[in-house]
Image: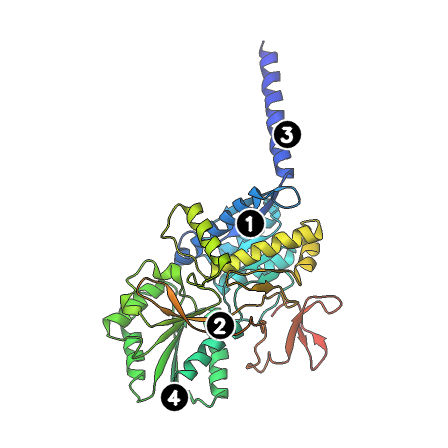
């Protein structure tokens, strides 16, 4: 009797293992690498939800290559070294075909050597500082010429003469501001007309810095703040502007990391008229956007859940991955990397995004003005989509570099003057 019972248990375990193995063979795994806790959770949690929604929708259509897609979700907890650790687990242990993740550039820089070493694929959905092009990363967020430079150009047209470049202290704000400072000086601005300030992640005491901005704006020249503040530090920053009576009419702020999600948790009445530069706003009028918002509300069960630019970048990246896998007929990394170049999919603004040879996508640029309801009214936009300039024309070490991952060049930083490739990334 004992022998028969053990045999039955053994058979049941074998069948269960076979079932799990069969399920694994019939699924294609992707990794979701976004902070669900810590200072960046305010922005990144929504992107985890977005990927899961897209996976559900694609599985209803039959998945990809006849297999269901399975999202493997991890929480790097706003801890930059942990991003690298989790990325390694996703590729080596979970055998994901691609990773959708990261928000800050420091998290992407942490993951970069891992995906290059293991030949993984990372879709990065947030605006960044440029100065990089990797064989293993596909950048669906904006490069500086697709966000920061057009934002400054808009403010120039409004007569701004003094510039407060205020950011969180890490690679994206520092490099973006280095580019913007060089750009402004190319327009004739002097050091005394440019103020630069950095604060740590999660900074909450903005009284002295906002006071400095207010004083900087009293020189008789129209002044603006260009904000690369990231994460939950934005909430006390805008609150302090209001506390010190600084309105958009006095000193307008144009932000690169504040969208509908960040505004949804604060009183936006004092912020009306301040600006943000993105490539998508929820208020965009298009059939594709209406459909996306409807699906989002249906998925979340919450009519008040907003959409934002990094969600659109995630949407574009996911659809590009699906199309490239189907084009390649496999999830093998090299084949998908090659297949991704040239892939074109609809964006949510009514036009299309194309993955270029530099692993960046074409994007429209929109300048939006904050409204009382936390939405943005578009006040300026490019007439067509813009091709990303991954290496800045305004930095001496970058202006001669291009990236082209097509064979035979296959280089992320090719120097057009020397005719030499400097490596996969910089």
Q: Residue furthest top?
A: 1
Element carrying mark 3: helix
Element carrying mark 2: loop
> Badges 1 and 3: C-beta atoms under 8 Å apart?
no
Q: Nearer the viewer, mark 2 or mark 1?
A: 2
Spatial separation of the CA atoms under disc 2 and disc 4: 25 Å
Which residue is located at x 37 percent, y 48 percent?
302
In the rendered view, tell whether residue 345 sits above or below residue 216: above
In the rendered view, tell whether residue 354 sits above or below residue 306: below
* Residue matched to label 1: 31
Q: Quarter of the image for the C terminus: give it.
A: bottom right
The disc placed on residue 18 is 3
Q: Dot 1, crowdedness within 10 Å: few (<14), some or many (≥20)? A: many
Q: Of marks 2 and 4, which one's residue comes earlier in the chain?
A: 2
Spatial separation of the CA atoms under disc 2 and disc 1: 27 Å
Q: Of marks 1 and 3, which one's residue comes earlier in the chain?
A: 3
Spatial separation of the CA atoms under disc 3 and disc 4: 70 Å
Q: Nearer the viewer, mark 3 or mark 2?
A: 2
* Residue matched to label 4: 192
Q: Of marks 1 and 4, which one's residue comes earlier in the chain?
A: 1
Colour convention:
rainbow
Left or right: 354 with respect to 127?
right
The disc placed on residue 380 is none
Q: Of marks 3 and 4, which one's residue comes earlier in the chain?
A: 3
Q: Is residue 412 visible?
A: no
Q: Of marks 2 and 1, which one's residue comes earlier in the chain?
A: 1
Left or right: 7 with respect to 303?
right
> Badges 3 and 4: C-beta atoms under 8 Å apart?
no
Spatial separation of the CA atoms under disc 1 and disc 4: 47 Å
* Residue matched to label 2: 147
Q: Dot 4, crowdedness within 10 Å: few (<14), some or many (≥20)? A: few
């Amino acid at each position: 009797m004992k022998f028969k019972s053990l045999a039955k248990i053994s058979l049941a375990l074998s069948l269960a293992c076979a079932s799990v193995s069969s399920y694994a063979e019939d699924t294609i795994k992707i990794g979701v690498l976004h902070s669900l806790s810590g200072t960046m959770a305010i922005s990144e949690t929504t992107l985890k939800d977005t990927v899961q929604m897209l996976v559900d929708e694609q599985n209803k259509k039959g998945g990809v290559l006849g297999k269901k897609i399975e999202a493997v979700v991890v929480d790097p907890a706003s801890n930059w070294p942990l991003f690298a650790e989790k990325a390694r687990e996703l590729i080596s242990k979970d055998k994901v075909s691609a990773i959708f993740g990261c928000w800050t550039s420091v998290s992407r820089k942490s993951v970069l050597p891992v995906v290059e070493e293991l030949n993984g694929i990372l879709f990065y959905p947030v605006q960044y500082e440029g100065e990089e092009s990797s064989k293993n990363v596909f950048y669906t967020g904006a490069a500086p010429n697709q966000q920061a430079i057009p934002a400054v150009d808009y403010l120039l047209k409004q007569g701004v003469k003094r510039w407060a470049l205020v950011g969180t202290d890490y690679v994206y704000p520092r490099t973006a501001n280095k580019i913007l400072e060089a750009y402004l000086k190319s327009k004739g601005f002097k050091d005394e007309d440019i103020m630069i300030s950095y604060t740590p992640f999660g900074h909450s005491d903005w009284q002295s810095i906002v006071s400095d901005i207010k004083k900087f704006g009293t020189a008789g020249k129209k002044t603006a703040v260009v904000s690369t503040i990231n994460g939950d530090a934005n909430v006390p920053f805008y609150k302090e502007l209001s506390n010190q009576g600084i309105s958009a009419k006095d000193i307008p702020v144009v932000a690169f990391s504040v969208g509908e999600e960040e505004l949804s948790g604060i009183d936006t009445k004092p912020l009306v008229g301040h600006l943000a530069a993105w490539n998508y706003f929820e208020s965009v009028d298009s059939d594709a956007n209406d459909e996306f918002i409807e699906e989002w509300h249906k998925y979340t069960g919450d009519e008040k859940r907003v959409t934002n630019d990094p969600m659109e970048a995630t949407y574009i990246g996911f659809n590009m991955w699906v199309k490239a896998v189907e084009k390649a007929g496999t999830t093998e990394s090299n084949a998908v990397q090659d297949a991704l170049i040239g892939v074109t999919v609809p964006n949510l603004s009514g036009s299309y995004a194309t993955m270029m040879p530099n692993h960046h996508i074409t994007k429209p640029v929109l300048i939006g003005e904050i409204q009382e309801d936390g939405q943005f009214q578009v006040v300026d936009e490019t007439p067509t989509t813009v091709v990303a300039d991954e290496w800045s024309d305004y930095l001496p070490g970058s202006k001669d570099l291009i990236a082209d991952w097509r064979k035979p060049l296959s280089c992320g930083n090719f120097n057009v003057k020397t005719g030499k490739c400097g490596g996969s990334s910089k």
